[in-house]
């Protein structure tokens, strides 16, 4: 039952636990909750489309596209477009019952046919690689049983399925709109049933989101029932961290994303702040095990021992972003192996010993180790300005100097988003190490990133080119295990295999940090991967 607007706002005043804040609170000081208004949000990067397979797209598509289910703070899967669901005894069929009467903003029904069509879109032709790889090779088909009942069939049991479809990549679009419009129209203004619609996209500047006054399909995790309280959200793209953070103090923004860590202490004193450690794969180095120096595990391990990654991260990020020694799974992910994270503490003597034993005993005029006359050169390609901020790039520069002391000549190669994702560095001959992350609410991320890559079944996400059948079997066993404790033990074993062979090297957790003006309440992050939610937010004053 929908409450009155006055009741909604009164309830919303009490529901601000998702934010920690210091300083004055206008509501506590007698400020009145307000309806309407425009939230100005300072984000970092502009995506190529509003929806798609990149976390930056999920951040914004979450405002427009509703999902079937959502993830609560306690890790439980909760209703959204689906009111209930059941899995068959063999784990091969999930049956969802949909809310009655929900419509897309083009007026067409959010029914079982529409949901089934979306699953087939992701799997076959939707250009959303993350949705596809999150359910491959388990997804088989989807069909409408009746208008409110959709049945999802799997090829084999996959207990992480429900958790994975809570991600923003699985937002439901209108099939009618998608099929009747151009690719550009769908890219810029996808039609969903969410709390906002895309009013305008000023490329290079902002996306303007308008309130959907007919919104009826809020998730069970929402802070209030009913349409958004504000009228608009202006989703501005402000790449420079200094300018983005400064926009809060000038009043140009009400919320900013990715607060520079040098400003974090100031932010906690002046604003409401949110810090979220992203689950999934942390920011860690994929290590090229197919060609080059790192085909030798001893050299990979020397690389891990040869730099004080923990100290560099703590200094470079001012203690705000945690070091992560586990290269495979982030510490906020269920099934995280904390013991695996302890490996390869800084030990230059051990690094030197391993390199000596591997035959890299010569030194050239620059003190770089050599073997058979060839220098120990490492091509380290990193995403500049979209995976790595300037602070992150500084951490790499510190590590570069430390690796030099044990004889590695590390060439830092900044790559643009277009270069990195356009295939320039897809061939193993083009790099030796590349750091990246991958968000996911499940340790099943291991299957996406570490599934063997073969000619018959290539895996472009396995950037270490690491084919280990024991690892593959262990992850598949974990993915099929219904008992969570047993599954986590298997996921932990898989993480240990990766760590023992130094197929990846840990660096730091991917974080989402936000600063929110004191007069804006009820901004919160969804649990599965940290997208901000603005449909419950309201101003006080």
Image (tube, rainbow, N blue to C red):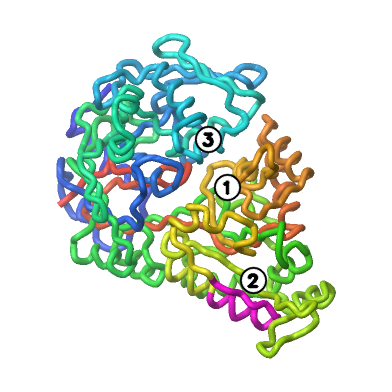
Tell me the number on the disc at residue 132: 3
- What span is colored magenta in the figure? 397-412
Label 3 to label 1: alpha-carbon separation = 21 Å
The answer to whether 460 appears left or right of 181 in the picture is: right
Mark 3–mark 2 CB contact (< 8 Å): no
From the image, state whether disc 3 or disc 2 is nearer to you.
Answer: 2
Q: Quick one: SS at disc 1?
A: loop
From the image, state whether disc 3 or disc 1 is nearer to you.
Answer: 3
Question: Is 500 one of the magenta-colored residues?
Answer: no
User: Looking at this rendering, what residue extends furthest in the right direction?
Assistant: 357
Label whose residue precedes the other's in the sequence (3 or 2): 3
Rate crowding at label 2 as few (under 14), some (14 to 19) or many (20 or more) other CA atoms within 10 Å. some
Compared to 73, does 118 lie above or below?
Answer: above
Report how many numbered discs are placed on residues in the image: 3
Q: Mark 2 points at which residue?
A: 378
Q: Quick one: SS at disc 2?
A: strand
Q: Name the residue under label 1.
A: 333
Label 1 to label 2: alpha-carbon separation = 31 Å
């Amino acid at each position: 039952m929908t409450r009155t607007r006055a009741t909604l706002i009164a309830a919303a005043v009490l529901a601000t636990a998702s934010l920690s804040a210091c300083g004055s609170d206008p509501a506590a000081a007698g400020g009145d909750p307000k309806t309407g208004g425009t939230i100005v949000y300072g984000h970092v990067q502009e995506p190529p489309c509003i929806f798609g397979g990149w976390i930056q797209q999920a951040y914004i598509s979450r405002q427009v596209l509703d999902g079937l289910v959502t993830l609560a703070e306690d890790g439980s899967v909760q209703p959204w477009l689906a009111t209930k669901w059941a899995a068959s005894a063999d784990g091969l069929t999930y049956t969802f019952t949909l809310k009655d009467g929900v419509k897309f903003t083009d007026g067409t029904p959010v029914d079982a046919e529409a949901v089934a069509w979306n699953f087939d879109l992701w799997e076959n032709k939707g250009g959303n690689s993350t949705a596809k790889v999150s359910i491959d090779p388990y997804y088989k088909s989807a069909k409408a049983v009746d208008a409110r009942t959709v049945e999802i069939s799997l090829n084999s049991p996959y207990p992480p399925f429900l958790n994975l479809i809570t991600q923003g990549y699985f937002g439901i679009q209108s099939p009618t709109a998608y099929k009747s419009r151009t690719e550009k129209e769908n890219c810029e203004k996808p039609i969903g049933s969410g709390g906002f619609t895309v009013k305008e996209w000023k490329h290079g500047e902002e996306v303007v989101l308008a309130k959907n006054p007919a919104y009826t399909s809020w998730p069970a995790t929402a802070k209030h029932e009913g349409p958004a309280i504000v009228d608009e959200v202006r989703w501005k793209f402000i790449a420079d961290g200094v300018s983005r953070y400064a926009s809060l103090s000038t009043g140009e923004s009400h919320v900013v994303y990715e607060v520079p860590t040098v400003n974090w202490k100031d932010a906690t004193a002046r604003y409401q702040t949110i810090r979220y450690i992203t689950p999934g794969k942390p920011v860690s180095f994929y290590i090229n095990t197919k060609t080059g120096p790192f085909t030798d595990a001893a050299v990979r391990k020397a690389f891990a021992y040869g730099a004080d990654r923990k100290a560099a991260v703590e200094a470079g990020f001012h203690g705000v972003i945690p070091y992560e020694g586990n290269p495979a799974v982030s510490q906020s992910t269920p099934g995280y192996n904390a013991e695996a994270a302890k490996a390869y503490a800084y030990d230059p003597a051990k690094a030197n010993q391993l390199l000596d034993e591997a035959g890299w005993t010569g030194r050239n005029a620059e003190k770089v180790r050599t073997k058979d006359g060839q220098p120990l050169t490492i091509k380290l390609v990193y995403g500049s300005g979209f995976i790595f901020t300037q602070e992150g790039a500084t951490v790499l520069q510190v590590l570069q100097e430390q690796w030099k002391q044990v004889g590695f000549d590390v060439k830092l190669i900044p790559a643009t988003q277009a270069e990195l994702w356009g295939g320039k560095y897809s061939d193993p001959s083009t790099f030796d190490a590349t750091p990246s992350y991958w968000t996911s609410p499940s340790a099943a991320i291991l299957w996406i990133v570490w599934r063997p890559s073969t000619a018959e079944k290539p895996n472009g996400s396995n950037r270490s080119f690491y084919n280990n059948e024991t690892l593959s079997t262990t992850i598949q066993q974990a993915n099929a295990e219904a008992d969570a404790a047993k599954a986590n033990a298997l996921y932990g074993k898989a993480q240990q295999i990766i760590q023992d062979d130094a197929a990846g090297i840990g660096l730091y957790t991917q974080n989402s940090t936000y600063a929110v003006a004191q007069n804006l309440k009820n901004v919160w992050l969804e649990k599965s991967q940290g997208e901000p939610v603005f449909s419950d937010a309201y101003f006080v004053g």
